[in-house]
Amino acid sequence: MPAFITIRFLDILDIFLVALLLYQLYRLIKGTVAFNIVIGLFSLYLVWIVVRALNMELLGSIMGQFIGVGIIALIVVFHPEIRKFLVFIGTNYNLNRVFSIDKLFGIGKIKTINHEQIESLVDACVSMSKSKTGALIVIVRNLELAEQINTGEKLNARISSALLRSLFFKNSPLHDGAVIIKGNRIAAAGCILPLTQKEVDKNLGLRHRAAIGITENTDAITIIISEERGSISFAKNGEIKRRISKEGLTTFLEENIISTAN
């Protein structure tokens, strides 16, 4: 009697989880050099299958040795992508909240930014946009960005339009770096951020590339003021949206800061 194929619910769940995993991996490496490497490795694997099927022992053994150490090679080559993927899991599924001892016992709570401070932030951005003052502002959400904060000058200052404008004034010693806002305070200025490795518009400068880069590896959001055009942009999850109006910036901040805090 021929055996019929039985499909269990766990089999369907298994297929769904693998598809979800592959989709998330595709999102992480899309537009990067890593994507081309994956295509190359997959092509090499297909050639190896054909070589084995044709019983070409010498070439097959050489390629087999190469593929045998492929896992170690993948870890070395895809180290940034693996790190990004693990950060994605920890931030998007709020595992850091579950395992946070400080939050478990209700200590170390950070006050969140309010509507008045958002207005000050927007006012500073609009003012710098009109004067074509280049600026890069990072707003912390769940991940604390302690590593990036330590690269700059720690301030722990109240958020105000005047202070933000003075920090990015062209003669200020801190104007070239990023300002990081944590909670309802300006945590640091003159901070160094990682640049994105994916292909972006060639017209985008280092500020925009840094803004995209920090949002690729963390759940932070960024605001960028172009020094050449004076346009306002924001970045989230590795994606940038350019030429934002004052109203659009306000809506973006309220949706991604206040609603997240609630």
Image (cartoon, rainbow, N blue to C red):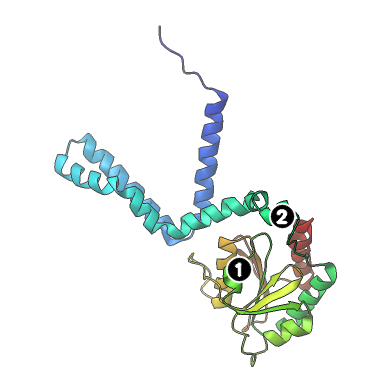
Helix, strand or loop at mark 1: helix
Q: Is residue 30 visible?
A: no
Q: Position of residue 134 (x, y in %)?
A: 64, 83
Up the image or down, 61 lies above or below 123; here it is: above
Q: Position of residue 141 (x, y in %)?
A: 69, 62
Left or right: residue 239 versus residue 75 is right
Residue of label 1: 146
Q: Amino acid at mark 1?
A: Ala
Q: Position of residue 87 (x, y in %)?
A: 56, 56
Along the line of sight, the residue nearer the viewer: 123 or 248: 123
Within-10-Å neighbours for mark 1: few <14, some 14–19, many 20+: few
Residue 103 - label: 2
Helix, strand or loop at mark 2: helix
In which quadrant will I find the C terminus? bottom right
Q: Residue at x 75, y 64 (%)?
A: 110
Q: Amino acid at mark 2?
A: Lys
